[in-house]
């Protein structure tokens, strides 16, 4: 199974651009895929059937939607949406957005720590163990009475240690403070028709990242000296501009430490520039593939917890992100495990009765309902969270096939497992967490609130054990062939 690096490279290279990703083509893509297994062909049949049903007008399942609404409420505490009055046969407008998935430059795959090195570590550990045993039973065997009193002492010590361990567990709280807030108050931004260069110095040489439609640069507000990030988005037509204005609208509603904050926006004839809070720790993706970065399971708990906090807030605000992936999670700094979610380019408000369908997304992270052109909802983001968790823990992409067809078919068949050696040391709680997210039927997935309550993210004694164990994630393992 290829690593995340290889995965990303191969998929990005082949992913269709803007207008090619039409419904019929997508169906063709799935149906024409390699006939790898019975399950897959079964599933292909299912896709065809579902699409036929959709074409026949049987597109909206009330019970499923109500279930989703309940989940939204559970996550939000809000009352049900106003759209409840509209009848099933009413056709709410479909929103189909075609957005080109262009590539970030795929990274060269990096070598991983070899088995030899792993062996050395194991050896070191067992040596320490041996020497401790030797000390305990070492020379100087004394009389019986002395032995008895010694064993009592030992017992008392063990009891003491037990108590200490217990209180250590009780006291053990993982460092879970939120990341630093943006260096400015939340503000409602309206794109200004001015020249950005009158107010900011954009460092054109320093590219922080490449996006779908342009690049992100470091920049400086001349009046305040604030260091910010400027995302330059090419937008010529009204339609393109509306897509960017939607991103501004969404960001205007989101005020949370785990969500990158918008500072200003400038609109010109050919582009719209979003000026945002700047973070310098790089993409979470880079930590997955960096063999020098010692990612432990507890680190992953901290990352996923913050993503969940951000998602819980977004879902409370009735907003779906729809493009969650490790590239869209930025680390605040190299030294801490604090993160912020970025890229609200595909985010939108969830409307219970709206026939919202999306036909974009990086194949590896697409939820089954997105591939099937069904309604996207809060659980769609939770699927992506499951994929990210799997990737962080193992360095592997759960659904990645040899090509896009296979990847899509694997997703539709919900075909994934923990069989790889990378999962050997991973806790059962982590595996259960992923299992409760990578569920084909969206109504059965954990919500963000439920995820935060799951033992993997909330059980202190588990975190204590993970901290003691310091079990490393994938980067200490040799990649499977
Ligand atoms: P797009 O929507 O075009 O994909 P993104 O918002 O995902 O663009 O940004 C592209 C890349 O630029 C990100 O993956 C990240 O590496 C970098 N980047 C984006 N925003 C920031 C920021 N606020 N601070 C630092 N780097 C950023």
Image: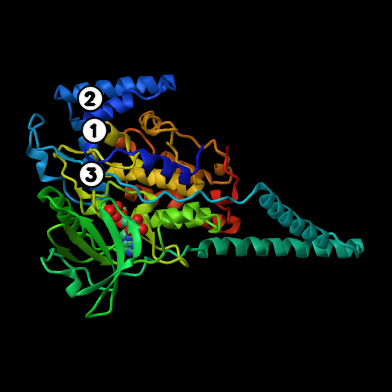
* Labelled pair 3, 2 in contact (Cβ < 8 Å): no
The residue identified by callout 3 is: 99
Marks 3 and 1: which is nearer the front? 3
Instruction: Label 2: state its secondary structure.
Output: helix
Picture coordinates of residue 404 (x, y %)? 37, 34
Point out the quarter of the image occupied by ligand 1.
bottom left
Q: Is residue 404 left or right of residue 142?
A: left
The residue identified by callout 2 is: 51
**Is residue 140 depicted above or below 214 in this figure?**
below
The alpha-carbon separation of the residues under discs 3 and 2 comes to: 22 Å
Residue 373's label in the rendered image is 1
Q: Is residue 163 left or right of residue 34?
A: right
**Label 2 residue near ligand 1, CB within 8 Å:** no
* Front residue of this view, candidates 53 and 275: 275
* Labelled pair 1, 2 in contact (Cβ < 8 Å): yes
- Quarter of the rendering containing residue 92: top left
Q: Is residue 417 left or right of residue 238?
A: right
**Label 1 residue near ligand 1, CB within 8 Å:** no
How is the structure coloured here?
rainbow
**Is residue 441 depicted above or below 76 in this figure?**
above
Picture coordinates of residue 441 (x, y %)? 32, 33
Crowd around label 2: few <14 · some 14–19 · many ≥20 (10 Å): some
Crowd around label 1: few <14 · some 14–19 · many ≥20 (10 Å): many
Tell me which label, 3 or 1, sits earlier in the chain.
Answer: 3
Tell me which label, 1 or 2, sits earlier in the chain.
Answer: 2
The alpha-carbon separation of the residues under discs 1 and 2 comes to: 8 Å
């Amino acid at each position: 199974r290829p690593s995340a690096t290889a995965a990303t490279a191969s998929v990005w290279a082949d992913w269709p651009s803007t207008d090619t990703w039409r419904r019929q083509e997508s169906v063709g893509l799935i149906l024409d895929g390699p006939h790898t297994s019975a399950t897959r062909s079964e599933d292909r049949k299912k896709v065809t059937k579902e699409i036929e049903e959709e074409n026949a007008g049987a597109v909206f399942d009330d019970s499923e939607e109500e279930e989703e609404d309940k989940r939204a409420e559970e996550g939000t505490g809000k009352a049900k949406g106003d759209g409840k009055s509209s009848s099933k046969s009413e056709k709410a407008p479909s929103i189909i957005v075609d957005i080109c998935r262009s590539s970030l430059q795929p990274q060269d795959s990096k070598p991983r720590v070899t088995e030899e090195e792993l062996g050395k570590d194991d050896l070191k550990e067992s040596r320490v163990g041996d020497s401790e045993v030797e000390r305990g039973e070492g020379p100087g065997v004394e009389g019986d009475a002395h032995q008895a009193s010694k064993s009592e002492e030992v017992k008392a010590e063990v009891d003491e240690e037990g108590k200490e361990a217990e209180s250590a567990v009780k006291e053990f709280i993982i460092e879970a403070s939120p990341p630093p807030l943006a260096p400015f108050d939340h503000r409602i931004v309206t794109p200004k028709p001015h020249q950005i260069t009158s107010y900011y110095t954009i460092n054109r040489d320093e590219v922080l990242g490449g996006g779908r439609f342009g690049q992100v640069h470091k920049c400086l507000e001349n009046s305040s000296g604030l260091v910010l990030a400027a995302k330059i988005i090419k937008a010529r037509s009204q339609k393109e501009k509306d897509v960017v204005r939607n991103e501004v609208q969404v960001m205007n509603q989101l005020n949370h430490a785990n969500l990158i904050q918008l500072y200003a926006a400038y609109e010109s004839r050919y582009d719209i520039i979003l000026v945002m809070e700047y973070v310098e720790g790089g993409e979470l993706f880079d930590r997955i593939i960096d063999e020098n970065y010692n990612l432990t399971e507890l680190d992953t708990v901290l990352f996923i917890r913050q993503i969940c906090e951000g998602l819980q807030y977004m879902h409370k605000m009735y907003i779906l992100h729809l493009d969650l992936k490790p590239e869209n999670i930025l680390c605040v700094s190299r030294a801490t495990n604090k993160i912020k979610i970025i890229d609200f380019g595909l985010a939108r408000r969830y409307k219970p009765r709206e026939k919202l369908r999306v036909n974009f997304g990086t194949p590896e992270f697409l939820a089954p309902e997105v591939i099937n052109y069904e309604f996207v909802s809060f659980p769609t983001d939770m699927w992506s969270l499951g994929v990210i968790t799997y990737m962080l823990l193992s360095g592997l992409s759960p659904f990645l096939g040899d090509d896009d067809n296979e990847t899509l078919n694997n997703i539709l068949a919900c075909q994934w497992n923990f069989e790889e050696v990378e999962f050997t040391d991973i806790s059962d709680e982590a595996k259960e967490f992923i299992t409760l997210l990578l569920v084909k039927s969206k109504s059965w997935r954990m919500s963000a609130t439920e995820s935060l309550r799951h033992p993997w993210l909330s059980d202190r004694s588990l975190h204590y054990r993970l901290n003691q164990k310091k079990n490393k994630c994938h980067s200490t393992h040799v990649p499977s062939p």
